[in-house]
Image: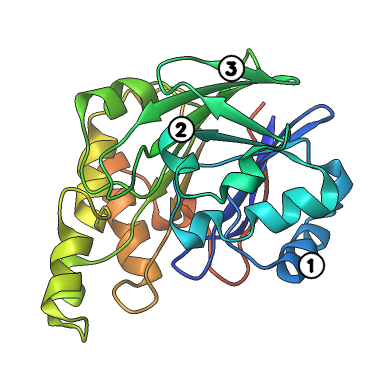
């Protein structure tokens, strides 16, 4: 199993997870042409994508899903809550399938385990992907950790973890007060130190990859995010990767 990022941040998100001939795209917040270009950069064609799995309805995660699915005939998995924000005509297509947040499901060679998270969306979920040997955990777009999140991610072999903002930078920055409250609230986004605190609670004995994701261009810096996670793990900052907004992240092998 391997994974790569097309890009991560408020301007668009998409992650690829591959096992054998099964290739799943987690979210797609990019336009059609941009998505195809970013796939090509990773040596992937749209026809290679087996399915798209959606975390929630915010445009930086779902904005490119419908057009990609229509053009390339790609199956889309999403929760009923997220589906309420998709055009009804789209959902009549058999390209759409529904996720029960309490139940695993299989896409080809990948087992997909959803788990619920606190975020300001209708029925937001994040995911753990498994090939039967190794597990990749993904957590972005949550305002706080929960015991359920920690149990879901404990013992994973690779982790993509939100480090959205540095709290001091956010509070001193140009965002209006209401937006600052939303971003830093328990249904907003994880700051660097909250992500590090979550990491400390996990069983990290199998952990081979940690990727900081969804960094804010305005309210964070790469070295602050990687430094916080490195401190939590007791490792060097260069061991922590970053999924960048523009360049994404190249393929990483998990198993």
| Image location of residue 185, percent across then percent down | 15, 55
- On screen, residue 119 versus residue 109, left or right, reads left
- Mark 1 sits on what residue? 37
Label whose residue precedes the other's in the sequence (3 or 2): 2
Q: Position of residue 168 (x, y in %)?
A: 14, 72
| Circle 2 residue | 80
Q: Visible in this render: residue 237? A: yes
Task: Name the spot of residue 219 as percent of width and height, x first.
Answer: 29, 74
Q: In the image, what residue occupies the spot 58% across and 17% down?
A: 105
Tag 2 and tag 1, C-beta contact below 8 Å: no
* Mark 3, residue position: 105
Real-space Cα distance between discs 1 and 3?
Answer: 29 Å
State left or right for residue 40 relative to residue 54: right
- Regarding residue 44, the answer to whether it shows in the image is no
The vertical placement of 167 against 58, above or below, is below
Mark 3 and mark 2: span between their CA atoms?
15 Å
State the SS at label 3.
strand
Q: Position of residue 64 (x, y in %)?
A: 63, 59
């Amino acid at each position: 199993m391997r994974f790569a990022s097309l890009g991560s941040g408020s301007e668009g998100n998409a992650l690829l997870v591959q096992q054998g001939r099964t290739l799943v795209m987690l979210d797609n917040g990019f336009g059609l042409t941009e998505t195809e270009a970013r796939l090509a950069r990773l040596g992937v064609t749209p026809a290679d994508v087996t399915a798209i799995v959606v975390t929630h309805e915010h445009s930086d995660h779902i904005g490119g899903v419908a057009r990609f699915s229509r053009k390339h005939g790609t199956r889309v998995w999403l929760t009923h809550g997220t589906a309420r924000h998709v055009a009804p005509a789209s959902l009549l297509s058999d390209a759409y399938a529904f996720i029960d947040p309490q139940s695993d499901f299989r896409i080809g060679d990948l087992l997909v385990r959803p788990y619920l998270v606190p975020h300001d969306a209708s029925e937001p979920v994040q995911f753990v992907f498994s090939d039967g040997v190794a597990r990749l955990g993904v957590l972005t777009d949550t305002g706080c950790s929960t015991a359920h999140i920690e149990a879901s991610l404990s013992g994973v072999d690779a982790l993509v973890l939100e480090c959205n903002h540095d709290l001091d930078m956010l509070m001193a920055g140009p965002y209006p007060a209401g937006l600052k409250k939303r971003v830093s609230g328990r249904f907003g986004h994880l700051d660097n130190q909250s992500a590090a605190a979550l990491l400390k609670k996990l069983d990290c004995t199998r952990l081979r990859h940690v990727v900081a994701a969804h960094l804010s261009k305005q309210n964070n810096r790469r070295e602050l995010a990687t430094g916080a996670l490195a401190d939590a793990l007791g490792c060097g900052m260069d061991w922590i990767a970053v999924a960048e907004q523009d360049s994404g992240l190249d393929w990483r092998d998990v198993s």
